[in-house]
Image (tube, helix red, strand yellow):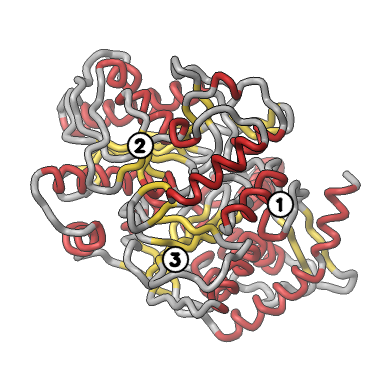
């Protein structure tokens, strides 16, 4: 089974065997661009990245296993959720891909959230579509399909416009009882869009929805050539429904049952908490999405994650090189992260905002990275690094506090992403931030690319007659022997993070002033 995930900084491919263990991996580094004040990726980079990642997998299979990779038992595609890919009737792109990172949809969000009685986040596809209508964009009369990046790549491989229910839940609200778009809210949104001047039919523009276990198409000849221009890969393999990175992160950590959750930290950072029942009211800080099986999930999504940490690490790496002691990335991160364990638990008078882009949870449409300290505060590396790591978790904690107030409880929280690569560091700080035991393990080492490969395996099993739920399949067939390491929150760290967060919230006007005046 082949899993491909298009993340915010890396396109990754993972090949797994029948026991779900990794046989080969491949990757391609890429980066978004800010074009006309909107974050985007070019579709040429999508194609080049897919071919590079798959080519590395094929080369590894040939070199390590002595086999030419000609056929697959199944595959799946995952990508960054949300955003807006507008296609015409010939499946040609109408405007540059608008990613989840864009927060220019404020007017649309206000109108839709009020009309639907549902928190519609800035990055959701329906928000981007409605904002385009409000702005009178000229591409709208030719709009045939509005999809996500995973949906776009899946269509390129299969010819099918379809989304997994988890990814679709970042496009438009889902009714978990029916497993597709909420019919009543769809009718309401159609009215709102029409009143703003939209002439199309929303139900026709949105891709159909499929749940985990369904076959969502087969690899076409054109799709095989997209992945493998050499001609070795043959068409015909079934594909599972394409999913968003949030859903594949849940699969990669076995967190799809109620009272389980996971935190994924990359360019953005988000927590997914599977709910036991509905929340009492609409909350601006929470997205209501679903698992790949369609169960309701509260998502705390923060636009800004580890990018500013990466930038500081890069600066220290440059200093080491300038001092004549060049260090590799792994050593730089390990040294800096381990130093943070000795830092002052409350940040010692230091404060950081990691806002490279807008942050809806703190109501900022744009961001400016900031570091501040009081004049009398000690200025040591350990506390500085603890402050920077705290900054990556601060907005996440603000959202998690809303769930706590709703009475939502967790039995376990898994964490995955590169920021947790240094053993016991970010894991400890996250446990303090959310006052919950945090588990990490090799099960999430390959992240969402492995998760979507597992979903492809689940689809094959279901197609062959396996009637287990997704949660049952993961518990019994995938994670039964998983080795996890769990850290309980330290009382001193918890109190320290609470103190840090109070200063963080109180000083938000400084961040807003930086946006307004720079």
Position of residue 10 measured from the top left corner of the image (x, y, whole percent):
48, 37
In this rendered view, identify the residue nearer to me: 208 or 244: 208
Q: Which residue is mark 2?
A: 77
| Residue pictured at 75% horizontal, 68% vertical | 504
Q: Which residue is mark 1?
A: 355
- Going from the N terminus, do you reach mark 1 or mark 2 first? 2
Alpha carbons under labels 2 and 3: distance apart: 23 Å
Alpha carbons under labels 3 and 1: distance apart: 24 Å
Q: Is residue 516 left or right of residue 207?
A: right
- Total marks shown come to 3
Say if 223 sits above or below 320 in the image: above
Q: Could you say which quadrant of the image residue 370 lies in?
A: bottom right
- Going from the N terminus, do you reach mark 2 or mark 3 first? 2
Whether residues under marks 3 and 1 lie with C-beta atoms below 8 angstroms apart, the answer is no
Alpha carbons under labels 1 and 2: distance apart: 29 Å
- Going from the N terminus, do you reach mark 3 or mark 1 first? 3
Q: Which residue is mark 3?
A: 273
Position of residue 153 measured from the top left corner of the image (x, y, whole percent):
40, 29
Position of residue 373 measured from the top left corner of the image (x, y, whole percent):
83, 66
In this rendered view, identify the residue nearer to me: 58 or 147: 147
Q: Mark 1 against mark 2, which lies toward the viewer?
A: 2
What secondary structure is marked by label 2? strand
Q: Please rate how many residues cluster around mark 3, counting C-alpha atoms within 10 Å: few if below 14, some from 14 to 19, many from 20.
A: many
Q: Where is the C terminus found, in terms of image quarters?
A: top right
Determine which of the numbered discs, if any, sits on residue 419 in the image.
none
Residue farthest toward the left in the current orientation of the protein? 465
- Is residue 422 in sight in this rendering? no
Say if 380 sits above or below 84 in the image: below
What secondary structure is marked by label 1? loop
Q: Is residue 188 left or right of residue 132?
A: left
Position of residue 448 measured from the top left corner of the image (x, y, whole percent):
38, 47
């Amino acid at each position: 089974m082949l899993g491909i995930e298009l993340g915010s900084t890396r396109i990754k491919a993972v090949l797994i065997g029948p026991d779900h263990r990794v046989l080969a991996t491949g990757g391609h580094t890429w980066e978004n661009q800010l074009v006309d004040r909107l974050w985007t990726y070019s579709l040429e980079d999508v194609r080049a990245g897919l071919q590079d990642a798959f080519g590395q997998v094929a080369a590894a299979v040939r070199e390590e296993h002595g086999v030419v990779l000609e056929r697959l038992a199944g595959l799946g595609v995952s990508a960054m959720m949300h955003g807006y890919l507008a296609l015409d009737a010939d499946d040609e792109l109408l405007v540059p891909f608008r990613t989840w990172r864009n927060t220019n949809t404020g007017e649309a969000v206000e109108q839709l959230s009020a009309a639907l009685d549902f928190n519609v986040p800035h990055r959701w596809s329906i928000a981007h579509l409605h904002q385009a209508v409000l702005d009178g964009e000229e591409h709208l009369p030719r709009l045939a399909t509005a999809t996500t990046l995973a949906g776009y790549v899946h269509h390129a491989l299969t010819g099918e416009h379809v989304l997994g229910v988890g990814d679709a839940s970042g496009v438009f609200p889902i009714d978990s009882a029916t497993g597709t778009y909420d019919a009543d809210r769809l009718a309401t949104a159609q009215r709102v869009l029409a009143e703003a001047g939209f002439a199309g039919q929303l139900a026709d523009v949105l891709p159909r929805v499929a749940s985990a276990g369904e076959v969502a198409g087969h690899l076409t000849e054109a799709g095989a050539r997209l992945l493998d221009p050499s001609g070795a890969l043959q068409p015909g393999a079934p594909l599972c429904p394409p999913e968003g990175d949030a859903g594949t992160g849940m699969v990669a950590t076995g967190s799809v049952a109620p009272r389980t959750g996971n935190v994924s930290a990359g360019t953005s950072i988000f927590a997914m908490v599977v709910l036991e029942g509905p929340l009492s009211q609409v909350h601006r800080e929470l997205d209501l999405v679903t698992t790949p099986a369609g169960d309701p999930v509260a998502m705390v999504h923060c636009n800004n994650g580890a990018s500013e940490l990466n930038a500081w690490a890069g600066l220290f790496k440059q200093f080491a090189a300038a001092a004549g002691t060049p260090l590799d990335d792994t050593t730089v991160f390990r040294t800096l992260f381990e130093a943070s364990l000795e830092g002052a638990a409350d940040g010692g008078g230091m404060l950081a905002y990691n806002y490279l882009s807008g942050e809806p949870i703190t109501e900022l449409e744009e961001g400016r990275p900031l570091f501040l300290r009081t004049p009398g505060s000690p200025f040591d590396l350990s506390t500085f690094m603890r402050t920077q790591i705290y900054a990556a978790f601060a907005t996440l904690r603000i959202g998690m506090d809303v769930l706590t107030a709703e009475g939502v409880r967790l039995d376990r929280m898994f964490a995955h992403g590169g920021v947790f690569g240094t053993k016991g560091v970010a894991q400890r700080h996250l446990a303090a931030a959310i006052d919950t035991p945090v588990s990490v393990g090799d099960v999430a080492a390959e992240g969402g690319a492995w998760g979507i490969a597992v979903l492809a395996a689940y689809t094959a099993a279901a197609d062959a007659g396996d009637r287990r739920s997704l949660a049952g399949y993961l518990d019994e067939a995938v994670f039964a022997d998983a080795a996890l390491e769990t850290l309980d929150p330290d009382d001193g760290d918890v109190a320290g993070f609470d103190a840090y967060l109070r200063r963080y919230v109180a000083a938000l006007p400084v961040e807003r002033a930086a946006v307004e005046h720079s």
